[in-house]
Amino acid sequence: MQIRTTPNPNPVSDERLAEVLADPGFGNHFTDHMLTVEWTPEAGWHDARIEPYGPISLDPATAVLHYAQETFEGMKAYRHADGSIWTFRPEANAERMARSSERLALPVLEVPDFLQAVEELVRIDQRWVPDTTAPDAGEKSLYLRPFMFASEKFLGVRPSQHVTFMVIASPAGSYFKGGLKPVSLWLTEDYTRAGRGGMGAAKTGGNYASSLVAQQQATANGCDQVVFLDAQEGKYVEELGGMNMYFVYADGRIVTPATGTILEGITRSSIIDLAQQMGHKVEERRFGIEEWREGVASGEIVEIFACGTAAVVTPVGSLKWDGGEVPCVHESGEVTMAIRSALVDIQYGRAEDTFGWMRRIV
């Protein structure tokens, strides 16, 4: 793509940026620029531009506001000790966005164009990528949010004839306040996230919107996250509101729910590869809620953890539901923490990337 750039005439000052990067939180602050590309059937993808970050203007009849035709991605840029900046498996994000776009009847942005768009924005806003060399720096990064939406002004129910793709970026600290600790889970028996033939495998806002009322239930019952069961039989574990799950058995094998109606997480697939490299047998299959309960009670399940781009790898604590509870298996199990360390060390350049996952930008 030919991308024209309009530098922000009033970028955030170095002093204010230092304050933000010292404690970025998650999704609270945004960089000086954003990238936009337009699509129409006649012109294809065109008018690619980087311009100052700011509000966008939408007509009240813009299609996405009425029919939720949109997709998005979540990924991170990491600063290594030598000052270089890298992304983690960005091609996989590009490929997943293509699959999501096809499911939502949106045009596909080809992988090279996706990569170029993300990388150009990171280059112009590279000062926003946190330095992680200080002893107390923690696991900071620049969170990248590519997204695509139906931007046609039209109220008819059909695929939009004007689509906008954008990339914004936000410095990120820990996803969970208070640092790494087991998350408590609420099992919803009232709501499901996706069913057979639905949009569960697509990364689209509707999936997350449907999880929010169940998340309210979880919060009201003193839990951090919600667990969804399958829509057909209501007995198989699928995923959390925004994370995939793993169950570690006493014999060393690891089980994770099979995809199809759940999001094919990039962190999820990376963990499968890492675990296998570390000698664990990994099973992708249907996993019943009773297997969870009985496995913990018998001691057969010794660790449980969840994963996602934002949260990385997080130990799972107790599971509660209306009328019952499965206690925490392990505060921070050996397998969980070994996998977490292996993944994070690759992302931050502290370990050899034998998988070829990292892609240098700067």
Image: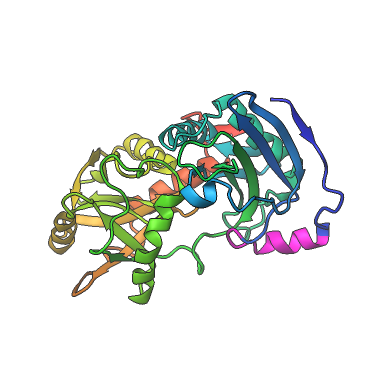
Q: Is residue 289 left or right of residue 76?
A: left
The verdict on residue 351 being magenta is no
Q: Position of residue 213 (x, y in %)?
A: 37, 65
Q: Position of residue 32 (x, y in %)?
A: 75, 50
Q: Please tell me in which quadrant of the rendered image residue 293 appears.
A: bottom left
Q: How many marks?
A: 0
Say if the magenta span includes residue 26: yes
Q: Residue at x 38, y 72 (%)?
A: 219
Q: Which quarter of the picture shows residue 210?
A: bottom left
- In this rendering, would 286 be left or right of 203? left
Give above or below for 203 relative to 185: above
Q: Position of residue 20 (x, y in %)?
A: 71, 62
As rendered, which of 285 and 209 lies closer to the eye?
209
94 sits left or right of 104 in the view = right
Q: Is residue 9 left or right of residue 293?
A: right
Location of the N terminus by quadrant is top right
Q: What residue lies at 73% left-to-right and 44% top-to-bottom?
A: 126
Residue at image location 61% in from the left, 31% down from the top:
39
Residue drawn where x is 14% and y is 64% of the image: 297
User: Do we see residue 183 in this rendering?
Assistant: no
What x and y, as percent, mark residue 339?
A: 39, 46
Q: Nearer the viewer, residue 105 or 48?
A: 105
Applied colour scheme: rainbow
Specify the segment rendered in magenta: 15-27
In the image, residue 50 above or below residue 55: above
Q: Which residue is situated farthest in the right direction here? A: 9
Question: In the picture, residue 140 is in which quadrant?
Answer: bottom right
Nearest the viewer among 80 and 116 is: 116
Main SS of the magenta part reads helix
Can residue 246 be seen in the rendering of this structure?
yes
Quadrant of the drawing holding the C terminus:
top right
